Amino acid sequence: MNKSVLAFFAHPDDAEILCAGILSLLKKAGYRIHIATIGLGDKGTATHSREEIISVRRAEAIEAAGVIGGSYHCLDFDDIFIFYQRESIDKASSLVRKLQPSIVFAHSPDDYMLDHEISSKIVQTACFTSGMKNMAIPEKPYGPVPHLYYTDAVESKDKFGDRIKPGLFVDISAEIETKEKMLASHASQRDWLMAHHKVDEYLLAMKSVARSRGDESGFEYAEGFRQHLGHGFPQDNVLLEILGKKKLKLTNQIK
């Protein structure tokens, strides 16, 4: 198995909010960590120009990934204009083939904004096409199809406010300080969220969700995931093999 992991999301700071804990665990297990975004993060500001915030957020994303020795990649699409179309599929597929991950993390298919939902579909397709010969991109195909896991939705709820039930919980109690440090690298987003959402306590909100998932699973802090188990995707739970039963609690989705 290629010991490479790709956390592939819509915007800078999504990976840190949703799965930085498990990325830290996998880094300790000997995996190379890559964080990628489809969007530039250009809408995440109430004060900066487009060019300024792109530069700021790229630097923040690089710093955050660096906390665990990871790399950052961006497909350079504008926020809010992330569409399921040929250019985005080709770019995402090219990155997957370039990095050849055996494990990929993506947004929940059901979330509060379309950038997240469309990114989830794009990443699913990029994984599925990893071994297809006739994709019109220069990178060579590789296989098998990587294991694909969906993270929690933001605030652990779908667009109707119903709480999402993970297929597995991962104990990130020992990684919560690392997760917090990674998220704190995205300093520009605290100001943006206060201005746009009227929400403060950027880091505390992340920890509150992790503690809530911990309460559900018997851990102090936890992250929730669902595995893509559709036709053509791996059916075994590789995270259980890597992290062991002490770090995972399974629900009725993945046995």
Image (cartoon, rainbow, N blue to C red):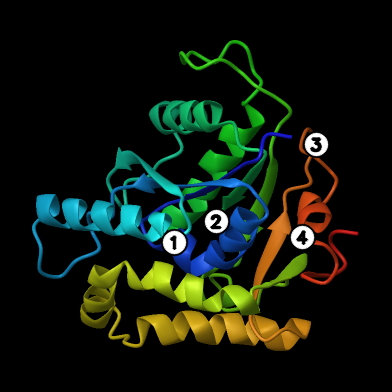
| Residue depicted at 67% across the width and 34% down the height | 2
Residue 219: x percent and y percent?
A: 73, 83
User: Is 88 placed above or below 22 here?
Assistant: above
Quadrant housing residue 194: bottom left
Q: Quadrant of the N terminus?
A: top right
Give the residue pinned by disc 1: 14
Disc 4 + disc 3, Cβ < 8 Å: no
Between residue 168 and residue 63, name the one nearer to us: 63
Amino acid bearing label 2:
His
Disc 1 + disc 4, Cβ < 8 Å: no
Q: Disc 2 vs disc 4: which is toward the camera?
A: 4
Residue 187: x percent and y percent?
A: 26, 71
Q: Work out how far the residue at label 1 is from the one at label 2, CA to CA, in angstroms.
A: 9 Å
Amino acid bearing label 1:
Asp
Amino acid bearing label 3:
His
Q: Residues within 10 Å of mark 1 (few under 14, many from 20)?
A: many
Q: Disc 1 vs disc 2: which is toward the camera?
A: 1
Q: Work out how far the residue at label 4 is from the one at label 3, CA to CA, in angstroms.
A: 25 Å
Disc 1 + disc 2, Cβ < 8 Å: yes
Is residue 74 among the parts visible in the rendering?
yes
Q: Work out how far the residue at label 1 is from the one at label 4, CA to CA, in angstroms.
A: 23 Å
Between residue 21 and residue 32, name the one nearer to us: 32
The residue sitting at the right extreme is: 255
Give the label on residue 231, or none: 3
Give the residue pinned by disc 4: 243
| Residue depicted at 62% across the width and 77% down the height | 174
Give the residue pinned by disc 2: 107
Amino acid bearing label 4:
Leu
The secondary element bearing badge 3 is classed as loop
Going from the N terminus, do you reach mark 1 or mark 2 first? 1
| Residue depicted at 73% across the width and 48% down the height | 228
Going from the N terminus, do you reach mark 4 or mark 3 first? 3
